[in-house]
Amino acid sequence: MQGCAQVEFPTGGARDTIPPVLVNSNPKQPAVNFTGNRIILYFNEYVQLSEVQQNLLVSPTPQRNPYIDSKLRTVTIRLRDTLEPNTTYTINLGNSIRDINENNIVKDFRYVFSTGPAIDSLSFSGKVQVAETGKADSTIIVLLYRNLADSAVFKQKPKYIARLDGSGNFSFQNLSGGEYKIYALKDGDGGRTYNSKTELFAFSDNSVIIDNKTVPVILYAYAEEKDRPKATPAEKVLKYTTKVTGQEHDVLTDLVIRFNRPLKNIDKQKIILTDTLNKVINNVVIATDSTNKDLLIKANWVKNTDYRLILPKDFATDTAGLTLAKSDTIKFKTRDENDYGTVRLTFLNFDKARNPVLQFVQNDEVVYSYPLTSAVWSAPLFNPGEYDMRILFDDNGNGIWDPGNFSQKKQPEKAFYISQKLSVRQNFEKDIENIVLPK
């Protein structure tokens, strides 16, 4: 006899997507009058641990973190510090517990116990926002100190620590009441103290009284100094690159010539801008940036026009006395009007007194920045592309974002991310209305 059915192996059923479940603990949670040094957690399936030390938060902060391991269906926590009397402890294992077969994560696992007769029940929440970008950074941690001295955040570990979620929100649970100082920190070295001006840091102007009426707070994180990349040995030759793309220049910007070494002894009279008939273009302004590596050519660029920039070999030397290897001519053409789009934006809650600055961002870099003088902003020529937008409230009116300073109790200037994206196409008009500015 012949069969017509196709022989197949069993599929094994649907994929397991359910994380392990805690079925018991010793001592049972929430434990009071705790006097031991070991906690055993029992789950309904085999479990494993992943990146425990990166996930682990213990509050109040111990001098030595507990030792944690797993075996079969259990996770064992061995405490290595002397516990404070009448104190509620929280051991947060984050996302470190998962099942063995499918790696399903037990999210934000917490075990709570008290060395006294009661569990503290007060809570405190808020949000941390990166002041320069208006966005959240979930790698920042929030620190609560009982010690109210400003020096504590430099010298001591905090009493309590909380993580941020993806939106920048934090929440402290099982707190005891009283007065605290609150900070936020991107803790680069894991020391739980503020020890580098290049770390993102935030502070509150006032201490926080935690009770049943405590309201959420917003902290604005900033880095007082930029993290400078390590210097690489400079080449012993002077050369340059330009931002001219495909021999086309944007009429909205300066022509930038970037040198590999800082320039010195620049003779601007030797630099000549001409048209293709070698007619010299007048009213050209030549400048350098603060590093003396960028040469900026400023002119009243005419659209759809050919230009030549002549750089004689000896127009400048670098700090070592080197010149260009040879004279050079940079040929380029400015873009036509049809290469641009038109943009018009209208804003709600506009307040000129706050010095709002409209910033257009690509790849986390501000590419265009314009002070707002009214609730309507427009540009008849705008480079095509995809842009994020944000508003900077420029307190000192210098046109750029300024960081805070904890020693001077100066908060950073604040930028706010605009949820709408800006998409600009060639020879098209883009109009976005009713963009809501923060009050």
Image (tube, rainbow, N blue to C red):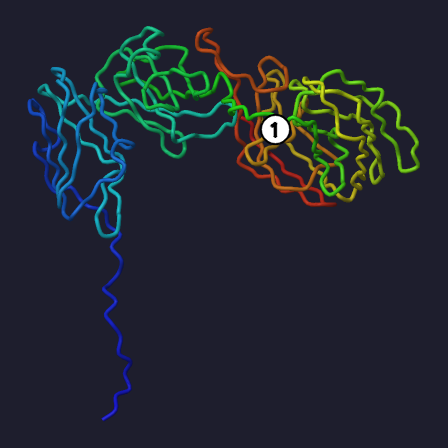
Residue nearest the viewer, comparing 73 with 371: 73
Q: Position of residue 349 (x, y in %)?
A: 58, 25
- For residue 185, above or below residue 103: above
Which residue is located at x 62 percent, y 42 percent? 423
Which residue is located at x 80 percent, y 38 percent? 332
Q: Position of residue 37 (x, y in %)?
A: 9, 25
Q: Is residue 261 toward the left or the right of residue 75 in the image? A: right
Q: How many marks?
A: 1
Q: Which residue is mark 1?
A: 359
Which corner quadrant of the image does residue 40 belong to? top left
Q: Position of residue 367 (x, y in %)?
A: 63, 31
Which corner quadrant of the image does residue 251 belong to? top right
Which amino acid is tagged 1? Gln
Q: Is residue 76 toward the left or the right of residue 264 in the image? A: left
Q: Position of residue 177 (x, y in %)?
A: 23, 15
- For residue 405, above or below residue 348: above
Q: Is residue 146 toward the left or the right of residue 300 in the image? A: left
Residue at the bottom extreme? 1
Q: For the N terminus, give its image quadrant.
A: bottom left
Residue nearest the viewer, comparing 166 with 96: 96
- Crowdedness of circle 1 by 10 Å Cα count: few (<14), some, many (20+)? many
Q: Secondary structure at mark 1?
A: strand
